[in-house]
Image (tube, rainbow, N blue to C red):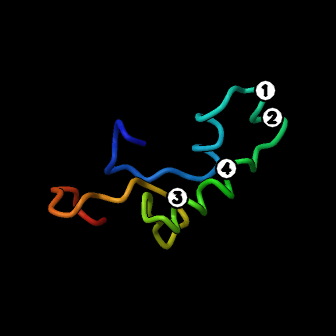
Amino acid sequence: MQATPESWYSRKEISRRAVSRQEFEENPQWATSALAGLLNDGVIETNPAGLYRITPAKGSSIRNL
């Protein structure tokens, strides 16, 4: 997510890319609670489609799509 902060990602894509394949296959929903915590802390944001991205810093040039 940090490499392309303007892009939105699904929970499944974040879950799959953040851990090994074996860990993902054992528990594909592992990221749900982690994403909820990051969302509550304001580190990430979500859109109406349920996709996630890193919250742009104030004064950032990232457009709100």
| Residue type beneath disc 4 | Ala
| Residue type beneath disc 3 | Leu
Query: Is 10 on the left or on the right of 60, as rendered?
Result: right
Query: Are circles 1 and 4 on residues that touch, CB within 8 Å?
Result: no
Q: Position of residue 27 (x, y in %)?
A: 81, 42
Query: Are circles 2 and 4 on residues that touch, CB within 8 Å?
Result: no
Q: CA distance from mark 1 to mark 4?
A: 14 Å
Q: Local crowd at mark 2 within 10 Å, few (<14), some, or many (≥20)?
A: few
Query: Where's the C terminus, which quadrant?
Result: bottom left
Query: Are circles 2 and 3 on residues that touch, CB within 8 Å?
Result: no
Q: In the figure, residue 20 lies in which quadrant?
A: top right
In this rendering, the label closer to the viewer, 2 or 4: 4
Q: Which residue is mark 1?
A: 22
Q: Which mark is residue 31?
A: 4
| Residue type beneath disc 1 | Gln
> Image point 65% across, 37% down: which residue?
16
Query: Are circles 2 and 1 on residues that touch, CB within 8 Å?
Result: yes
Q: CA distance from mark 1 to mark 3?
A: 24 Å
Tell me which numbered mark, 2 or 4, is placed earlier along the sequence.
2
The kind of secondary structure element at disc 1 is helix
Query: Are circles 1 and 3 on residues that touch, CB within 8 Å?
Result: no
Q: Position of residue 8 (x, y in %)?
A: 43, 53
The kind of secondary structure element at disc 2 is helix
Q: Which residue is mark 2?
A: 25
Q: CA distance from mark 2 to mark 4?
A: 13 Å
Q: CA distance from mark 3 to mark 4?
A: 10 Å
Query: Is 17 on the left or on the right of 23, as rendered?
Result: left
Tell me which numbered mark, 2 or 3, is placed earlier along the sequence.
2
Q: Residue furthest front?
A: 41
Q: Which residue is mark 3?
A: 38
